[in-house]
Image (cartoon, rainbow, N blue to C red):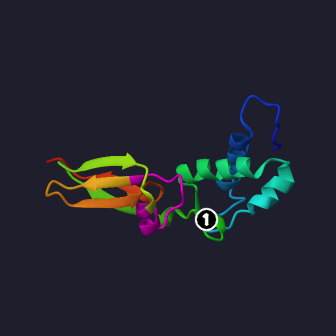
Amino acid sequence: MAIDPSADRPVYKQLADLIRARIEQGELRPGQRLPAESDYVAEFGISRDSVRRAMAVLRGEGLIITQLRGSRVRDAGEAAIVSITQGTSLMARMPTEPERKQLGIAEGIPILVITTPDGETRLLPADQTIIEVGDQD
């Protein structure tokens, strides 16, 4: 698959599509590091900004995790499963800078704010959290 700068679809979305397909086809496996930004720039002749935007799309979809030393395919087992019950509120929002640092998440990743009926609040990275709704009985 090639990236076509003259296509109607933005270049960063084309790159995200290409990487997503490689993950879905098993060419990039869970835990495997993705090529460096500079590798994508050289391979496809696109800007570093386009690569970063593509990575942000894939992080938002929960397919990759970006840390100090680059990005890697997220292992499905890395997501925390959180059960909520009736009366618990759930809200997604962008974190403040201190919250982002505390949770160790990259820019552009939303957080989930979970507030239990007794007022306890938890902040969780949205790209690493699966919410299960408990029985309403």
Towards the viewer: 10 or 133: 10
Q: Nearer the viewer, residue 95 or 56?
A: 95
Q: Is residue 61 visible?
A: no
Which quadrant holds residue 9? Answer: top right
Mark 1 surroundings within 10 Å by alpha-carbon count, few (fewer than 14), some (14 through 19), many (20 or more)? some
Q: Is residue 87 left or right of residue 16?
A: left
Give residue 2's position: percent from left, percent from top.
83, 43
Residue 17 colored magenta? no
> What residue is disc 1 on?
30
Q: Is residue 127 visible?
A: yes
Magenta stretch: give its range: 98-111
What residue occupies the far front of the structure in this picture? 97
Does the magenta portion include 105? yes
Kind of element beneath mark 1: loop
Q: Is residue 76 left or right of residue 92?
A: right
Asked whether 16 or 133 is in front, the reply is 16
Residue 127 located left or right of residue 11: left
Specify the amino acid type for callout 1: Pro
> x and y percent of residue 87 in the render?
17, 48
Q: Which residue is farthest top?
A: 8
The residue under the point 66% across, 63% down is 29
Total marks shown come to 1
Give above or below for 31 relative to 13.
Answer: below
Q: Is residue 122 above or below residue 8?
A: below
Place of residue 132 in the rendered image (x, y in percent of width and height, measured from the top left): 32, 53
Q: Residue at x 81, y 44 (%)?
A: 1
Please name the residue shown 61% across and 65% down the image: 30
At a point 81% along the width and 54% down the height, the residue shown is: 41
Work out whether residue 137 or residue 111 is closer to the camera in this orientation and state it: 111
